[in-house]
Image: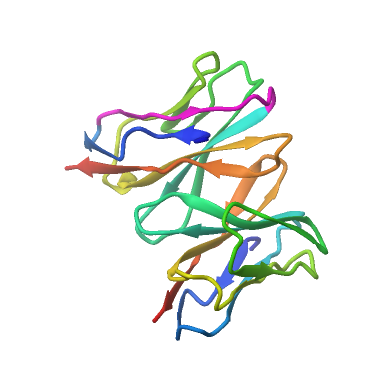
Amino acid sequence: DGGITQSPKYLFRKEGQNVTLSCEQNLNHDAMYWYRQDPGQGLRLIYYSQIVNDFQKGDIAEGYSVSREKKESFPLTVTSAQKNPTAFYLCASSMNYEQYFGPGTRLTVT
Amino acid sequence: AQKITQTQPGMFVQEKEAVTLDCTYDTSDPSYGLFWYKQPSSGEMIFLIYQGSYDQQNATEGRYSLNFQKARKSANLVISASQLGDSAMYFCAMREDYGQNFVFGPGTRLSVLP
């Protein structure tokens, strides 16, 4: 089945550690996105990529980094520079007008 | 500037009744798309309905319809015959064709009462 996978569903890290969240899609979509969602809030764009080897910062890119070496994959690294990393992270991809989402990763940093 | 406004943080509706969730947007781009997503407590984002800025007809998908009033920059979601499974967060979103990004509103929490 085609879709977007994010792993793991839950992730726990100690403060000061970098952590990488995976996002893979087999929909052959060019564009991929990372969003952050805090409790009771909407989605905020962290990074997006329209094509392989190219990506742009979204509204809240500070403390995050991404790579897009393959069309199918768009991993997000939450660095120790991110002040409040605990959140729900959603990856998405799009072709034309519709955007498809992965199931999300809930990151807790203590 | 807030591009998507959802003025109802929470809404209640009786099972089998219809409910309207409000969404207004702001853009100077003549070509854009409007979307509604449902987010149950599991966290997944489920695409519900899409309306293009040049579409003449209001979009419909099963029990969902989008009341698109372009001059008022309004794109309200109407859910007919509410079901208990409709209880969730609902997000309105917009994509400007020039901007390529999706912008989301703050969401409305809908609770369907038995």
Secondary structure mostly seen in magenta is: loop
**Residue at (70%, 39%) from the top-left corner?**
B99
- Decide which of A13, A7 is in the foreground and name it: A13
- Decide which of A39, B33 is in the foreground and name it: A39
Is residue A33 visible to us here?
no
Direction from residue A22 to residue A95 in the image, left or right:
right
User: In the rendered image, which quarter contains the C terminus of chain A?
Assistant: bottom left
B22 drawn magenta: yes
Q: Is residue A100 above or below residue B35?
A: below
Within the image, what quadrant is residue A108 found in? bottom left
User: In the rendered image, which quarter contains the N terminus of chain A?
Assistant: bottom right
A25 drawn magenta: no
**Residue at (26%, 46%) from the top-left corner?**
B84
What percent of the width, then of the height, locates residue A2?
66, 61
Magenta stretch, residue numbers: B17-31
Q: How is the image coloured?
A: rainbow
